Image: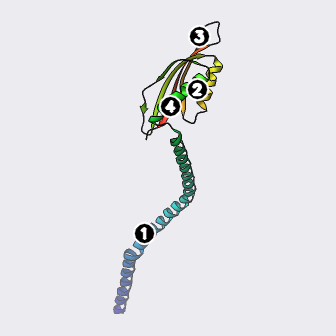
Amino acid sequence: MTLTRQSNWIVTLSLAAVALAYLTLVWLPGRKSLAQLQQTIELKRAVIAQSTGLSDALLQTHRELNETETLVRQWEKISPGKKDSPALYGKIHAMAKNSRLSVTRFDPQPIVSHEQLKELPIVIACSGSFDQIYEFLRCLEQQSQTIWVENLRMDKKAKNTKDVQCEISLVVFSDNL
């Protein structure tokens, strides 16, 4: 009987060793690998879920980019170049005269260059009624070029008149290319 008992123990220990080897060499590493794969799958599902919302945002961004590029191309067509500056200055001076203003100073300032734009500053000193100054500013606003009124100062010319002295600082924006 001792032989059978010994053989039972040998079989039992052999099965236990095989089970332990299977557990440590196959099942635990496989379980760990499976957990990592599940985690990777969850991450990829989250990315896919986010990307559906991003595609709408990306399409909207592309539409806005196209609209912006169209506006820039249109602006570049109407923006005065360096060779157009004298004609533009003459046009602004003529608008002041057509508004019946008395221009006492028309002083183009040095051009300020930026990466994509140039600023063409102009200082105009004039006198006339408030309505005439308003008409001049209205004419400036209706121009296709981008013209900013950077500063406007009005002083009453005399106590008994309706005329005012006015100094206007304008900035005309031009394409730098």
Nearer the N terminus, badge 2 or badge 1?
A: 1
Mark linked to residue 32: 1
Nearer the N terminus, badge 4 or badge 1?
A: 1
Q: Residue at x 52, y 21 (%)?
A: 124
Residue matched to label 3: 157
Mark linked to residue 87: 4
Foreground mark, 1 or 3, reads 3
- What amino acid is found at the position of numbered circle 2 in the picture? Met
Q: Secondary structure at mark 1?
A: helix
Q: Eyeballing the image, is 74 above or below 1?
A: above
- Quarter occupied by the C terminus: top left
Q: Residue furthest top?
A: 160
Mark linked to residue 65: none
Nearer the N terminus, badge 4 or badge 2?
A: 4
Q: Eyeballing the image, is 144 above or below 28?
A: above
Q: Quadrant of residue 164?
A: top right
Nearer the N terminus, badge 3 or badge 2?
A: 2
Foreground mark, 3 or 2, reads 2
- What amino acid is found at the position of numbered circle 1 in the picture? Lys
- What amino acid is found at the position of numbered circle 4 in the picture? Ala
Q: Secondary structure at mark 4?
A: helix
Foreground mark, 2 or 1, reads 2
The alpha-carbon separation of the residues under discs 4 and 2 comes to 12 Å
Q: Quadrant of residue 165?
A: top right
The alpha-carbon separation of the residues under discs 4 and 3 comes to 31 Å
Residue matched to label 2: 95
Q: Residues within 10 Å of mark 1 (few under 14, many from 20)?
A: few
Residue 11: x percent and y percent? 37, 87
The alpha-carbon separation of the residues under discs 3 and 2 comes to 22 Å
Q: Secondary structure at mark 2?
A: helix
